Amino acid sequence: MTADTARLRPPAHRVSPRALWYWTVKAAVLWIVLLVPQVIWWFADSDGASLPHVIVGVVWLLLAAVHMVVMPQWRYRVHRWEATDTAVYTQTGWLNQERRIAPISRVQTVDSERGPIEQLFKLANVTVTTASAAGPLKIDGLAAADADQLVTDLTTRVGRTTGDAT
């Protein structure tokens, strides 16, 4: 196997460390939304401090704390990406982990996206679309400048490729 043969392997680069805070904030928003029904239940129930309320509250608090502390750290250790002259490599997930590779000759489009929360953290997401039935490769949590550079580099590489992109 030659050095530039594309093979499934761990990608070289981690996402931005700011992705830790981004994922934590996204998880916090989810848990706050899940708190609303509990608060409504608490105020609607005449026995506000009953045992079921305390049990549900403690379980909610423990699950929220574990999710907001463990998940971002775990995802940061797993999420990786790399773009070479021959392929784009991604590794994503935290419970369900996925490692993918797309040869440059198969890349059809390269997109960058920044939602409002990503903009607060100066992050961006890059989507590399191929003709694969598995769907596009997504690289979430890149520093905005890294995402811009990656999009530019991939666009240049794809433009130099004579592959069929199908």
Image (cartoon, grey):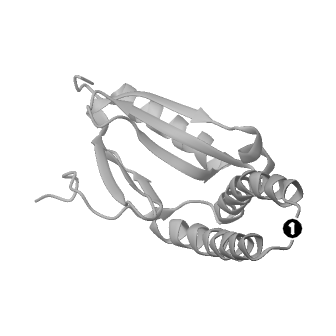
| Label 1 sits on residue | 47
Q: Is residue 154 left or right of residue 119?
A: left
- Residue at x 50% of width, y 48% of height: 139
Image spot of residue 61 (x, y percent): 72, 73
Image spot of residue 86 (x, y percent): 29, 44
Q: Is residue 12 left or right of residue 104?
A: right
Locate residue 72: give its quadrant: bottom right
Image spot of residue 73 (x, y percent): 58, 73
Q: Nearer the viewer, residue 108 or 133?
A: 133
- Residue at x 61% of width, y 40% of height: 148
In the depicted structure, whether residue 133 falls above or below residue 10: above
- Residue at x 24% of width, y 57% of height: 8
In the depicted structure, whether residue 125 falls above or below residue 3: above
Residue type indicated by callout 1: Asp
Label 1: which secondary element: loop
Image spot of residue 45 (x, y percent): 84, 59
Q: Quadrant of the N terminus?
A: bottom left
Q: Nearer the viewer, residue 128 or 58?
A: 58
